[in-house]
Image (spheres, helix red, strand yellow):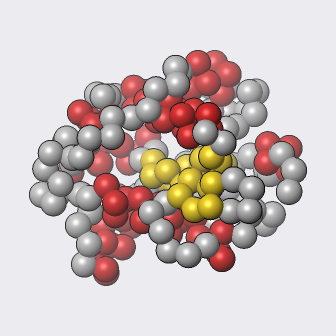
């Protein structure tokens, strides 16, 4: 398929990528957000864009502790470290932008707890199957995926490689 940075059109931050030449994610079985393909693992990571971050932490305040972030910038840098950790293990991470209302509706239709991490992961996998994901990483001179408007090399690309806290949410099931 080639290098995705060279063959894919760069998306506008917060909008889905042009998926006309994406990997065949439609054929992936339902899963937890990471599926094995012929060459690499494809991981669709749930991500709350800037305009959804405040809604997410208002609904699930413990997410700030889980992410070790009080601001959207801190959250973006923590997520960048998590993305780098996936890439270090030859996994191809993608960003699945979570819109709180759409996610809540999706969970309600399936009678799922929206506070549960496994359900965010399942929703991210669903967004991947629908092609509503953003390729990562952007080119160094491309706009950063976080939506800051800065070049990737001057924004999230400077974040250290450190995964997000993987502890179970303390109030899982209460949101």
Placement of 134 over or under 167, stated as above or below: below
- Residue 137 rendering spot, x and y as whole percentages: 67, 38
Query: Observer-nearest residue: 150 or 69?
Result: 69
The answer to whether residue 103 shows anywhere in this view is yes
Q: Is residue 146 left or right of residue 112?
A: right
Q: Is residue 73 left or right of residue 139?
A: left
Quadrant assignment for the C terminus: bottom left
- Residue 155 rendering spot, x and y as whole percentages: 58, 22
Q: What residue sits 45% from the left and 63% below the top?
A: 32
- Residue 120 rendering spot, x and y as whole percentages: 37, 59
Placement of 99 over or under 4, stated as above or below: below
Q: What residue sits 45% from the left and 48% below the top?
A: 47
The answer to whether residue 147 shows anywhere in this view is no
Q: What residue sits 75% from the left and 33% below the top?
A: 139
- Residue 95 rendering spot, x and y as whole percentages: 55, 49
Q: Quadrant of residue 131?
A: bottom right
Q: Is residue 100 left or right of residue 111?
A: right
Placement of 145 over or under 100, stated as above or below: above
Q: Quadrant of residue 172?
A: bottom left
Quadrant assignment for the N terminus: bottom right
Query: Observer-nearest residue: 13 or 65?
Result: 65
Q: Is residue 38 left or right of residue 146?
A: right
Query: Observer-nearest residue: 95 or 29?
Result: 29
């Amino acid at each position: 398929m080639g290098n995705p940075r060279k063959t894919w059109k760069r998306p506008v931050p917060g909008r889905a990528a042009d998926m006309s030449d994406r990997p065949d994610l439609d054929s992936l079985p339902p899963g937890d957000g990471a599926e094995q393909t012929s060459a690499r693992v494809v991981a669709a990571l749930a991500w709350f864009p800037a305009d959804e971050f405040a809604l997410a932490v208002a609904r699930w305040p413990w997410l700030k502790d889980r992410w070790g972030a009080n601001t959207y910038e801190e959250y973006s840098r923590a997520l960048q470290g998590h993305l780098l950790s996936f890439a270090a293990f030859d996994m191809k991470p993608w960003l699945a932008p979570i819109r709180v209302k759409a996610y809540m509706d999706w969970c309600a239709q399936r009678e799922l707890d929206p506070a549960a991490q496994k359900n965010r992961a399942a929703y991210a996998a669903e967004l991947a199957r629908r092609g509503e994901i953003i390729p990562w990483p952007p080119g160094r001179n491309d706009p950063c995926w976080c939506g800051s408007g800065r070049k990737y090399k001057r924004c999230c690309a400077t974040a250290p490689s450190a995964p997000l806290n993987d502890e179970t949410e303390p109030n899982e099931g209460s949101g």
